[in-house]
Image: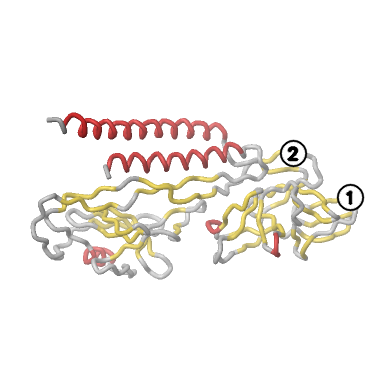
Amino acid sequence: MNRGLYIGATSLLTNQRRLDVLANNLANINTAGYKKDISLAESFPEKLLTKMSKTPELRNIPRGNEIQFEELQGGVYRARTLDGYFVLETPLGKSYVKEIEFVLDEEGYLKTSYKNLEDENKTDYENYIINNNGNRLQGEENLANILQESLYYPPPYVVGTMSGGVRFQKLFTDFTNGSFIDTGGKLDLAIKGDGFFKIQGEDGEILYTRNGSFAITDGYLSDIDGRRVLGQNGEIFLNGGEVDILPNGEVRVDEEIIDVLDIVDIDNKEFLRKRGDNLFYIVENGEIQELAFQGEILQGHLETSNMNPLSGMVEMVNLLREFEANQKVVRMQDEMLEKAANEIGRV
């Protein structure tokens, strides 16, 4: 396949997915407690480019120390190489790079990372650095020597590397708080600080939400779709009377304490996934890490969406311009193929 067509097509597909995510964010600007999604894209693995006429392959002979190695802030390391390549193990195959930033995971493996909203380095679903035998690098000392011994030196007919394009990797949910609006509703609640309301889902599943627009269904405190809101003693039954919910989560009916809202903060928010209806669940095989709630409940208020419509429209314009640029690349490649087939072929 023509590489230019392939790279342009992957860029078009990725921008289309990013545009869909952005459109969903803009559609939920007025949804209480909505958390916007951020698109994460990555390039395909860097593959080695070779000459058409190949000389006999030479062995990968180790050379002198040529690595530029430095330790950055926050436990991040950066390394560069001149002649060789660092090799990454990715879901799509090996990738060969000249410069790399990595951290040490919990088991001491050298791995690429990303930062979450708390500015912590996370390595889930990231790539391992491997040696020439395909073994993952591990160690906490002499990292420069470990990297030097793992460098891959290509044969002479290799002229460099090239990526096959970009792909949509995953969604990242931004859990920063929105602003608050005063509704005056007794059952409208907003969480000031980090935390989630617990909702009883189907088959006893625990769901989480920031949307505090609640109602009373069959005498129980529930969300607008009838799902029961959970307290520390289970479902909260409100037997008429004046309902007051205190900043610490106490639910009182006619000044009598009925229960306390079961509100928790979640340490590993990267394992939360959207279910729909503004609800979150823990990904399959994910282990929930709940923390004690340290915030405050505001009765008569709702949290707004954390999506900024102005920045969203600016991002949409940029995405459309990128889409048009990739369309021109595809069109240009198509015209070149047409000339190669119709004009050069006649000569």
Residue occupied by mark 1 = 242
Q: Quadrant of residue 126?
A: bottom left
Q: Position of residue 300 (x, y in %)?
A: 77, 43
- Above or below, 241 relative to 180: below
Q: Amino acid at mark 1?
A: Glu
Determine crowd level at label 1: few under 14, some 14-19, many 20+ residues with C-alpha closer than 10 A.
few
The residue lying at 14 percent from left, 62 percent from top is 64
Image quadrant where one finds the C terminus:
top left
Residue occupied by mark 2 = 182
Outermost residue toward the left in this view: 55
- Above or below, 226 relative to 22: below
Q: Nearer the viewer, residue 293 or 151?
A: 151
Q: Position of residue 197 (x, y in %)?
A: 69, 55
Say left or right for 29 vs 345.
right
Say left or right for 175 vs 9.
right
Image quadrant where one finds the N terminus:
top left
Q: Quadrant of residue 138?
A: bottom left
| Mark number displayed over residue 207 | none
Q: Amino acid at mark 2?
A: Asp
Q: Position of residue 133 (x, y in %)?
A: 25, 69
Q: Position of residue 158 (x, y in %)?
A: 16, 53
